[in-house]
């Protein structure tokens, strides 16, 4: 069973999402949902970290989630304000390379989610040696301040949660 369903929660989620997206429980839809629920986890198995995830400081994880939620709301309001009050030529979008100290693949995955879910930022790339991250910013006038923010608000807590 483990051979065909290496990650059952992912398979179940894919199956349900496929049915919801298609808004049907016809035989063909059920069959395609089952195929995707089996095939996608098998095809993406090599992308998942091999090590078991260990959250070493649950309190730090809770605090980080509050920080991220606050930052997401604040960023959404800022992006909305900028879109409503500035013209394109007044925006300062750019790519910023953030040097990283953490190397844990689970911590990097969480950082990717934080960056992707925060309005105004987008994950660009991670270097092959995982020593730096390229992030696109919607409007940033002080890249050094942004780097310091990522390192203090996200990287340090993630290192405490996953690498301590």
Image: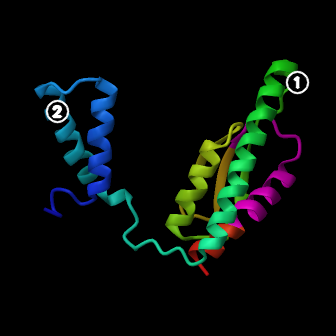
Residue beneath the point at 83% across and 48% down: 143
Residue 137 appears at what percent x and percent y? 73, 39
Q: Nearer the viewer, residue 98 or 110?
A: 110
Residue 27 appears at what percent x and percent y? 11, 27
Number of dots carrying numbers: 2
Side of 33 relative to 88 (left or right): left
Provide the major secondary structure of the magenta segment. Answer: helix
Q: Is residue 132 visible?
A: yes
* Cα–Cα gap, marks 2 and 1: 50 Å
The C terminus, quarter of image: bottom right
Q: Nearer the viewer, residue 59 or 44?
A: 59
Q: Above or below — where is 143 with respect to 36?
A: below
Circle nearer the viewer, 2 or 1? 2
Residue assigned mark 1 = 90
Q: On the image, which quarter does residue 130 sit in?
A: bottom right
Q: Nearer the viewer, residue 9 or 135?
A: 9
Side of 119 relative to 87 (left or right): left
Magenta part of the chain = 136-155
Residue assigned mark 2 = 30
**Element class at badge 2:** helix
Residue beneath the point at 73% across and 35% down: 76
N-term mark: 2 or 1: 2
Residue 132 appears at what percent x and percent y? 65, 60
């Amino acid at each position: 069973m483990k051979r065909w369903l290496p990650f059952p929660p992912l398979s179940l989620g894919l199956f349900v999402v496929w049915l919801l997206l298609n808004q049907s429980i016809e035989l063909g839809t059920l069959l395609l949902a089952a195929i995707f629920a089996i095939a996608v986890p098998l095809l993406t198995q090599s992308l998942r970290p091999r090590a078991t995830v260990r959250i070493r400081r649950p309190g730090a994880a809770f605090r980080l989630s509050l920080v991220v939620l606050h930052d997401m709301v604040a960023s959404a309001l800022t992006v909305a304000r900028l879109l409503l009050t500035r013209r394109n030529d007044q925006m300062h979008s750019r790519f910023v390379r953030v040097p990283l100290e953490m190397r844990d693949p689970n911590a990097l995955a969480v950082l990717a989610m934080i960056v992707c879910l925060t309005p105004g930022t987008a994950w660009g790339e991670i270097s092959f040696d995982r020593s730096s991250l390229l992030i696109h910013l919607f409007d940033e006038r002080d890249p050094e301040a942004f780097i310091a923010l990522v390192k203090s608000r996200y990287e340090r807590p993630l290192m405490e949660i996953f690498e301590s």
